[in-house]
Amino acid sequence: MTIRFIHTADLHLGKTYRTASAESLRYEDFFVMLDSIVKHAIDEAVDFVLIAGDLFHTGQILPRTFARTIESLQPLKEASIPCIAVEGNHDWIHRRESISWMEALSEMGYIRLLRPSRTESGGYRFEPFRSEEGIGGYIEIKGLHIYGLGYIGTQAGSHVERICESIATTGNILLFHVGIWSYSPVEIGNMKPEEALPLSAKFDYVALGHGHKPYVVERADGQPYAYNPGSPECVNFGEERFDKGYYLVTVDEGIYRHEFRQTSPRPMMVTTINLDGAENADEALRRLSEAIRPKLFRGVDDRKLLLELKLTGRVRFHPFELGRERLRLLLDELCHPLHVEIKNHLSLFTREGGQEREQKHLGEIEKEVVRELITARSEFKGREEELLRLALAIRDQVMKGECEGDDLLGMLTAPQNHQ
């Protein structure tokens, strides 16, 4: 019997830029992408859809996001195509006394949320999915056993042995929100390839999520066993370099054949402009305009682009003179981007006592100030760099306008119950 399914991940529903004038357009991008995947699933008459974590961008979503998600998933429900999902690190809700939105979707029958229970000794117990409660560790569809394991933190590799010990049969599917080092572009939540390899003995297809870049993991004999489709929409700057899409998978007599279906995300551009030697802000703006014009998309996609602009070089005027608002006005004239992020790494180049002197740029000054504040506290000894990265990450999220208070608290709260 031939079985077909779609494997997608990292949809990040609810993401937008709250500081952008057209935030509703960006908000809708992610739902439009899910709508297209759902339509394809119905057109292809697949047997089920897998979502390998991060359905939502944050655990604390707005009611309108929940309602819009139901609207997107409703056609799957009406077509009797099961949508099987696990929780990613973005879906995780740090206030566990509250029901999560993922759990609510599962109870309502829009997804089948898979989550194993734990034994007293720390092992895993995958119990059958219970529709009336909307929870379980595995589900069987047309003879295939699909096991689910969401985000379990930075030590996922050390859990593989216990995961395999809990599975009695072979030839299964595992839905797992984790990355594999050397393949995944993310910095945390990965495990080493050698740590992941034992999964291939129990599972013919490991459906990964977490990293937004597509990749396939092979055993030493060249046989693939783990697949990450990446995110179908560009979520963060830098992802414009990656192929975007999801997998359409066919299982025939135990043989898995995957086909990468490309999607069409909103155009995104990251560019660096060197303004070295500019004498004043007006000259810098003129040079910026001349340098960026040839790089802009022309006639390929009529959607407004997402733009990250990094300015570098040593200039002879104070970088603060090239303020964000002045730069935004210029960029609006040039390409009217949907959203723009500006990284001003210009440094002031002065002449003192007949000698030239370069001052630190704003980003370096900010980093040094935060580092001094952290190192001044003895209880932070040994964690300085970790806390510095966290502090700067929180600053970046606030400046991008992506986070609410609960989201920032979630960045500070480790999911200890998932360890």
Image (cartoon, helix red, strand yellow):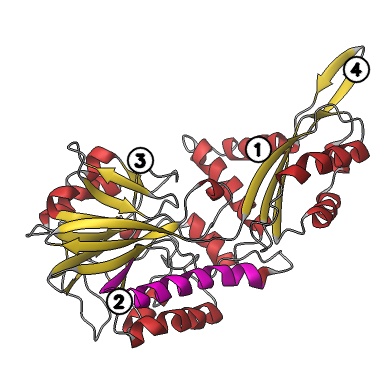
Marking on residue 367: 1
**In this view, the mark in front (2 or 1):** 2
Give the mark nearer the N terminus: 3 vs 4.
3
Residue interval drawn in magenta: 24-50
> Residue 300, percent across and down?
64, 56
Residue 31, magenta (yes or no): yes
Q: Label 1 amino acid?
A: Lys
Picture quarter with the C terminus: bottom left
Q: Is residue 97 visible?
A: no
Q: Which mark is residue 352?
A: 4
**Disc 4 residue type (three-letter):** Glu
Quadrant assignment for the N terminus: bottom left
- Is label 4 in contact with label 1 (beta carbons under 8 Å)? no
Q: Secondary structure at mark 1?
A: helix
- For the residue carrying disc 2, how many other residues have a C-alpha within 10 Å: few (<14), some (14-19), or many (20+)? few
Give the residue number, with chain letter if any, for mark 2.
45
Q: CA distance from mark 3 to mark 1?
A: 28 Å
Element carrying mark 3: loop
The dominant secondary structure in magenta is: helix
Q: How far is mark 3 from mark 2, CA to CA?
A: 34 Å
Which type of secondary structure does the marked residue at label 4 adopt? strand
**Relative to residue 307, is residue 126 drawn left or right?**
left
Count of numbered badges drawn on the protein: 4
First in sequence: mark 3 vs mark 1: 3
Residue 333's spot in the image, x, y percent?
84, 56
